Image: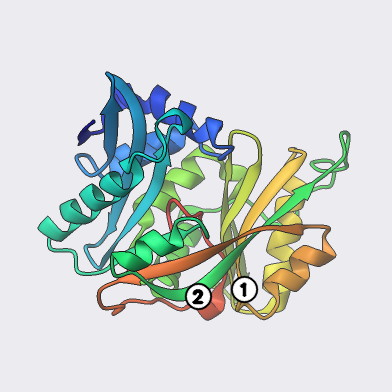
Amino acid sequence: MHIRAMTDLDVPAGLGLSRGAGWNQTAADWNRFLNASPGGCFVAEVDARVGGTATTISYQDRFAWIGMVLVDPEFQKRGIGTQLLKKAVEYLDQRGIRTLKLDATPQGQPLYAKLGFVTEYQIERWILNRPPGNAAGKVKSSIAHLTEAQLALILAMDRDVFGADRSFLLRSLQDEAQDFAMCITDQGAPQGYAFGRRGAFADHLGPWVAQCRAAAEKLLHEFLTRSTRETLLVDCLTPNPFAIELLRACGFGPARILTRMYRGPNAYPGNPDSLCAIAGPEFG
């Protein structure tokens, strides 16, 4: 086994691994990792094949995100995932980034705990499977597309909510799926906003941020209107007082639990009270 930096030539292999695992990433998502962290994404070569991956993204060097720890089923139980994770941690340590974060599956949580990661809070994936020919996309949208001025306000608000500047990621999401970039305002001030992605098999809502239930509900219903896919995903914070209730009322059901974990000082936790759903476990 040989671990090396991932390149754009490895995107098809990474996409094959994520689709084989039933994950929702597209080639555009893999390119986001490489664009955000050139030199910080890794593959494990086994018998001249890409047998595993791990990605990192740094947010203002306040904290970094580890994601996409994937291993080909043919090469599992060889410690490849552990070695890739250690490589990602080593890379970020060498860069002097003191806080590392990730969203762990139940299977991966014991490994992360052994490496010093501790629990911050829980995230639950909710899924909606709509019948073919549903009414989505047939109702007129009630929220206009984002203006550049609104986007600037959102990016400023998001720095407080997320804990660091991730404008490069949100701009990327808007560029790819403008219909899912939305904002609720009150007297010119943002009360909530949302972005989304068109994934391999489902449309994904996130980040979904709201300061009140009414704003959260309006953004969710607008996403349901704008999406024409049968399958929709939302990665919701379980401590949020109204997000899960709204999802359940719209027919979503729980699919899996993730655990937000961090290693090092959690000096920039953001404001999770306003966060209904994350951008995704691969992005934070």
Dividing the image into 4 quarters, which one contains the C terminus?
Answer: bottom left
Q: What element carries label 1?
A: loop
Q: Name the residue under label 1.
A: 238
Q: Quick one: 283 or 181, which is closer to the camera?
A: 283
| Count of numbered labels shown in the rendering | 2
Which sits in the foreground, 20 or 177?
A: 20
Residue 8 location in percent, x, y? 30, 26
The answer to whether residue 238 is left or right of residue 139 is: left
Taking the spot 42% from the left edge, 53% from the top edge, the residue there is: 283
Residue 38 visible at all: yes
The residue carrying pointer 2 sits among few (fewer than 14), some (14 to 19) or many (20 or more) residues within 10 Å by Cα, namely some
Do the numbered discs 2 and 1 sit on residues whose CB atoms are within 8 Å? yes
- Residue 121 badge: 2
Horizontal arrangement in the rendering, residue 6 relative to residue 253 (left or right): left
Q: Mark 2 vs mark 1: which is more N-terminal?
A: 2
Q: Nearer the viewer, residue 83 or 279?
A: 83
Q: Can the viewer see residue 95?
A: no
User: Residue 52 lies in what quarter of the image?
Assistant: top left
Identified at 17% across, 54% down, the residue is 90
Amino acid at circle 1: Thr
